[in-house]
Amino acid sequence: MEVLPLAHALGAEIRGVDITGAVTDAEIDAIREAWHRAHVIVFRDVEWAPDQHIAFSRRFRGLDDHAATPHDTLEGYPELLEITNIPKNGQPSQTRNTGRNWHSDYSYTNRPAAASMLYCVTKPPVGGDTMFCNMVRAYEGLSDKLKGIVADLQSVYDFSLVSGVGKRDPEKIKELLKINPPIAHPCVREHDESGVKALYVSERTSHFDGMTREESEPLIKFLCAHATRPENVYRHQWHVGDLVCWDNRTTMHLALGDFDESQPRRMLRTTLRGELSGFVVPPAA
Ligand code: OGA
Ligand code: MN
């Protein structure tokens, strides 16, 4: 197995292991270790069916059944989210604007996603890239004083800040807001496998618990800008057959709308289920 760095801050390509075949436990361990180091890992030229995608993902951790976003799963596969701009039953796809602000998956639930594995089925001729940033480096780059301040904060995640909400079916949004009320998680988290500390705040954070929106906004803005500085980012340009796996505990990501929307883009994602976390709070003042 070969691990090739893709960027300075995060990201590595893994070669020399056929993840569509019989992968040994030792290979899984080696992949996991490379993943903890690089935070985002990429496999190329993967040709597989939904069942194989699910089976490979399960080798790492239990999978989320996506009950927080039940409308977005692939029919017959609750373990697979379908992210596409291809219309469904004559209606615009509900996931066509998925991921258009910096975020960590399922932060608005009581089981923030541990990791995600996104597979490219169809892509536009150019663009449709995804960017990733390293939240461990972001945390480590803060002054000791600010590290102390954020250690005391709880980030409140609000489903209504999910990108493209205004473009979704309002009835479905009402239902999703009921399933996913605003929830507070620690602004600095320790990784449950590697123990590393990472910042946990995003463009889906409405405020810090106990503070007003007005008070919180400048700090949220600063922390997001600090985390997403170009030198802390890896930008993935997709090819059909890429499997990109990211650790949601140590990264944020952003799906760029840098493509011709009339061209089809279709991705399938498994979600490695996270630990129970957080407490439900009233919306911000
Ligand atoms: C996701 C997501 C990124 C993309 O699948 O969680 O944010 O580029 N999508 O489709
Ligand atoms: Mn996402």
Image (spheres, grey):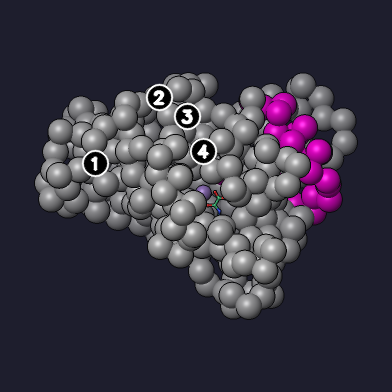
Q: From mark 3 to mark 1, how far is it between C-alphas?
A: 19 Å
Within the magenta stretch, is there residue 43? yes
Q: Which residue is mark 2?
A: 277
Which mark is in front, 4 or 3? 4
Residues drawn in magenta: 40-61
Q: Residues within 10 Å of mark 3 (few under 14, many from 20)?
A: some
Where is residue 75? Give x, y as percent: 73, 47
Q: Residues within 10 Å of mark 2 (few under 14, many from 20)?
A: some
Please determine whether, in this image, residue 218 is positioned above or below residue 125: above
Please determine whether, in this image, residue 122 is positioned above or below residue 263: above
Q: From mark 1 to mark 2, how far is it between C-alphas?
A: 18 Å
The residue drawn where x is 41% and y is 49% is 174
**Horizontally, is 224 left or right of 237 in the view?**
left
Q: Is residue 278 visible?
A: yes
Verify CB contact (< 8 Å) between mark 2 and mark 3.
yes
Q: Secondary structure at mark 3?
A: loop
Tell me which numbered mark, 1 or 2, is placed earlier along the sequence. Answer: 2
Of the residues shown, which amino acid type is indicated by label 1?
Pro
Q: Nearer the viewer, residue 242 or 78?
A: 78
Q: Secondary structure at mark 4?
A: loop
Q: From mark 2 to mark 3, how far is it between C-alphas?
A: 6 Å
Where is residue 136? Give x, y as percent: 40, 37
Q: Which residue is mark 4?
A: 68
Tell me which numbered mark, 4 or 1, is placed earlier along the sequence. Answer: 4
Residue 137, numbered label:
none
Residue 283, numbered label:
1
Q: Which residue is mark 3?
A: 111
Of the residues shown, which amino acid type is indicated by label 4?
Ala
Within the magenta stretch, is there residue 54? yes
Ligand 2 has an atom within 8 Å of the beta carbon of the residue at disc 1: no
